[in-house]
Image (spheres, helix red, strand yellow):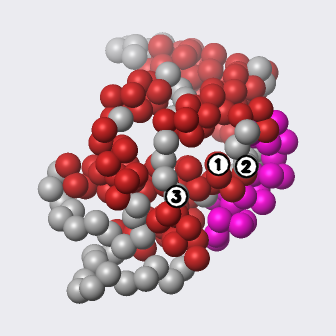
């Protein structure tokens, strides 16, 4: 997902010059007409919370969380004992092993376009079960994900005064949506629904 997302963001944030151009890239054109809604935000949040709940049921995830907490406590010690230093090394090794064993799950990072991203989502049953429950297609989930990142970055740059004109391919309604719903979106993010 990150490759496609970076491409969409880079293309959309390229400076607009002269008269507006017709967006030639079909994915970017599709993204520029996709409009964010609170209904879609709430569906996305429920899907992500469902994925988080599934992840928490995984014994390896539980072990990882326990080890990370133990490691955090050990790292805070001002003068750790030799045994505590040894334990930190053991925990670090085990965490690395758990990371290497991780089921890749939903990985859209190498998707080059919306079709590939949607296909990867469709190939991951846990996500598809949650999407069906929410009445959202894999393609809409992909578009929503990219649109909210694109609009969030654009809104952030505008608020900082770093962006004076709307970049080509960005739906201005989505940027306005991000600004108008900033507090609601932050609450959803804090609750784990917008991860």
Mark 2 touching mark 3, by CB under 8 A? no
- Say if 103 sits above or below 113 in the image: above
- Which dot marks residue 34? 3
Q: Position of residue 152 (x, y in %)?
A: 37, 49
**Nearer to the camera, 28 or 191:** 28
Residue at the far left: name it: 161
- Residue 40 visible (yes or no): yes
Mark 2 / mark 3, whichever is N-terminal: 3
- Say if 147 sits above or below 166 in the image: above
Q: Which residues are magenta?
A: 108-131
Q: Residues within 10 Å of mark 2 (few under 14, many from 20)?
A: some
- Residue 103 visible (yes or no): no
> The residue tagged with tag 2: helix, strand or loop?
loop
Mark 2 touching mark 1, by CB under 8 A? yes
**Nearer to the camera, 143 or 89:** 143
67 drawn magenta: no
> Which residue does the image show at 65% across and 65% down from the upper left?
114
The residue pinned by badge 2 equals 137
Image check: 5 left or right of 114?
left
> Which residue does the image show at 55% across and 35% down from the upper left?
39
Determine the CA span between mark 2 and mark 1: 6 Å
Image check: 14 left or right of 46?
left
Q: Position of residue 188 (x, y in %)?
A: 47, 27
Mark 1 touching mark 3, by CB under 8 A? no
Q: Position of residue 163 (x, y in %)?
A: 21, 62
> Which residue does the image show at 58% across and 76% down from the upper left?
26
Determine the CA span between mark 2 and mark 3: 14 Å
Q: Residues within 10 Å of mark 3 (few under 14, many from 20)?
A: some
**Nearer to the camera, 38 or 98:** 38
| Quadrant (top left/top right/bottom left/bottom right) for the N terminus | bottom right
> The residue tagged with tag 3: helix, strand or loop?
loop
């Amino acid at each position: 997902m990150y490759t496609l997302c970076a491409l969409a963001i880079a293309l959309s944030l390229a400076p607009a010059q002269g008269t507006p151009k017709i967006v030639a890239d079909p994915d970017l054109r599709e993204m520029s007409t996709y409009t964010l809604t609170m209904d879609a935000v709430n569906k996305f949040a429920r899907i992500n919370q469902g994925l988080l709940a599934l992840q928490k049921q995984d014994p390896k995830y539980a072990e990882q969380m326990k080890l990370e907490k133990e490691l955090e406590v050990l790292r805070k010690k001002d003068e750790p004992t030799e045994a505590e230093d040894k334990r930190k090394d053991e925990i670090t090794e085990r965490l690395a092993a758990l990371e290497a064993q991780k089921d890749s799950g939903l990985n859209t990072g190498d998707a080059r376009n919306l079709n590939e991203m949607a296909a990867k989502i469709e190939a991951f049953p846990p996500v598809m079960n949650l999407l069906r429950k929410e009445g959202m297609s894999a393609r809409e989930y992909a578009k929503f994900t990219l649109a909210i990142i694109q609009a969030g970055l654009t809104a952030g740059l505008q608020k900082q005064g770093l962006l004076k004109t709307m970049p080509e391919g960005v739906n201005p309604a989505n940027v306005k949506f991000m600004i108008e719903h900033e507090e609601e979106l932050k609450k959803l993010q804090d609750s784990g629904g917008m991860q």
